[in-house]
Image (tube, rainbow, N blue to C red):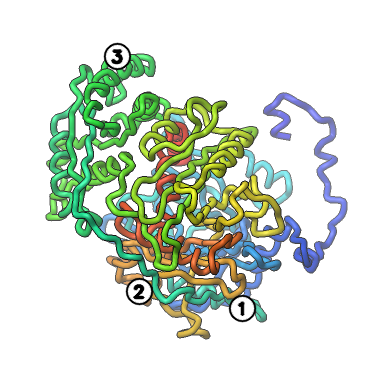
Amino acid sequence: MDVLRIWNEQLVGIEGKLIVTDVVPLDTSRLVTPGDISSLAYTVIPWLVGQALIQTPMQAARPIKLYQAADSSLLAWDDPIVSENDVRYASALHAIEPTLVLLHGRPQPYIQLRVKLTQVMPNLVGKKKHAWVKTGDLIVKAKLKTKKTDEGWETTYEHPVEKLLTFMGVQSLPPMVDGDIPVDSDVRPIYAIPPSNPMIASGPGPLFLDQAGFHLLASLPGTAPLLVKKAVASLREEKVVNTGEAANLNAMVLAAHADVMLRLHAASTTLAQDSKFFDKVMPPLVALTRLDVPDAQRMLEGKHDSNSLNDWLMNHVVPASKQASENGAKVMIVETSTSAASQEAGLDPKHVIRRVLAKHGIATQFIMHIDPDAQAKRRKTKADDRDFKATNSIIEAIRLSGHLPVPTPKVKSMPASTTVLSILLDRIQDKGPAIYLPVITRTVLGGNKPEVFWFESCLDSNGKWFSYGEGLAAIHGTDTLLKPDQLKTLVTQSLLDCKINSNDSLIVCLDANLRTFYGALKDGPGEGLPPVPSDAAVVRIRADHQVAQISGNHTLSPNSAHYIGTKVGAFQSCESASVFYFVSPSKQYGSVRSQRENTRYDVSERDLRDPWQQLGVTEITIITPGAFSTATVIAEQVALLCRNPSLWDGYLRLPGPMHLGKQVAADHPILEMRRKSEANRYGN
């Protein structure tokens, strides 16, 4: 009725029609049958699992009573984590989220548990979008709306929730709490943006995940864990002879402040000391050329309209860059500022600068100008002497140049000459059909010059292989993303000329998001693949929320929860022989001691400030092995591409060549501007 009123429409007697006339029992045994999974199963089965999990307390550091929320998640409502000092206090709730997920090659779905720590606001001051609300026996994640009134800011439930509850004869939601919110309140607002210096950091930790898994096993007799086994004893890279010659990197700098140039120059000379990656690898010889253009400060800080910025770039920056590029420079490091970054996405000059320069073949990396007055007020420690922002800008400029410091790693069992072609897919979904950005890269194992496939001149032209830097600029200079038919055309054309050397063996890594267009990439029944050569291995890569998490060691502790520790390597599913996993810790996971053998209930308030994480998992599914000897050999090679990236220190969630594509997509002006808009919208 309210929607009709908003649209100034009427439907006579609608309230009389909103009557439940019959309740039809749902036969849950028919949700999953051989060859068919009902769409209702993905909602009903997790809810039923949650019902089983709340029947008995979960055995953790203490027995925890779980409550099921309306979205099927389970909350430790009566056992919040609390931290307080003389100035402030904080609380957080453990949440367990059961979902129904498919495994490639397995007809039956399985239950996946994700665990989270939801940070609760101590009052209504700050950005928020939702609140956990307990009304009777039900907990809902209610939407909130904050507006400014004559008396100040007022927070209410998102219209028309309360009207709907009243109309249905259900108890209304409890009122908002003014001032400090008790930790046992029935209304617990959730931070839209977590605090930068939280008293309780993110993550419930690996041990809590394992405890949740064993609670599931105890609550649902007959269930069993999904097990994996070590696929290879260790990932060994074939040694490559190092020539000992340093590469050259020529880069332009567009800056309004001289200190930016000084910071970049200092960072370029101390890469070996300030970067763990270049501690082991010879850094390139970096030559920086600052562009001499007028009015740089006003333009780079966003104090202009879009037309004047475009004119400034075309009349001053582009001509200056052409002179500087005579020494081969095709990369530009551009100064930005907090004032520019704080503007709405459409007013931030970064997106226009990147697109305009890309149209002239220049790849861009941005560096934040540091206000010396603000910097002087900060407490300095020894670690602060290193300028990480400048160091990262130089490292990103190396990537943009397209010359990787070390060759793409290769396992010994791979053929001598093997091309790896990767297709990453990003997308935007508004009202109507989605639009897409595929980034297609290829490299030869043992080589260090990746290539990118893109349209030669416009979206109606044929595609061609560019060097990485040229291809990146061609993509960033494109004003629109692709429609489905354009995407499939580009993919098909790239596979007509996919090998760097005609006699190469070929591994094709496909983003799991491509299953929308190619049914054989789905976990369930489906047909259709891109036109890959018959001798090529086709590998589906997934690193999203549907990938199974590694929760414990079933060999060492089959009957009780146990901290899994640090694991690195390639594992194979015991349920589906085509599914492998690359498991690795992040730097944070390996360095935080407080999460070892503990849950949040076990540690001191000081340790509650440590962010906790789970082991990272990348799913590697061998769709077809092609001419390779075994699926394990392919999985080992792909896992090595995650473990030993050619530029970054640490482990990657995606194979190195696909990660290069992800970086291109993430920096596309359209996608970058869209994500900033979403962050601003959801953060308000």
Disc 2 marks which residue? 596
Image point 70% across, 53% down: which residue? 527
Q: Is residue 134 above or below residue 12?
A: below
Work out which quarter of the rendered image holds the N terminus and state it: top right
The crowd level at tag 3 (other Cα within 10 Å; few <14, some 14-19, many 20+) is: few
Say which label, 2 or 3, has the lower sequence index: 3
**Secondary structure of residue under mark 2:** loop
Badge number at residue 601: none
Disc 3 marks which residue? 315
Residue at the right extreme of this rendering:
21
Disc 1 marks which residue? 224
* Residue 160 rendering spot, x and y as whole percentages: 64, 39
**Secondary structure of residue under mark 1:** loop
Asked if residue 551 lies left or right of residue 514, the reply is left
Image point 80% across, 65% down: which residue? 30
Say which label, 1 or 3, has the lower sequence index: 1
Q: Is residue 127 above or below residue 61?
A: above
Asked if residue 643 lies left or right of residue 392, the reply is right
- Quarter of the image for residue 288 reads top left
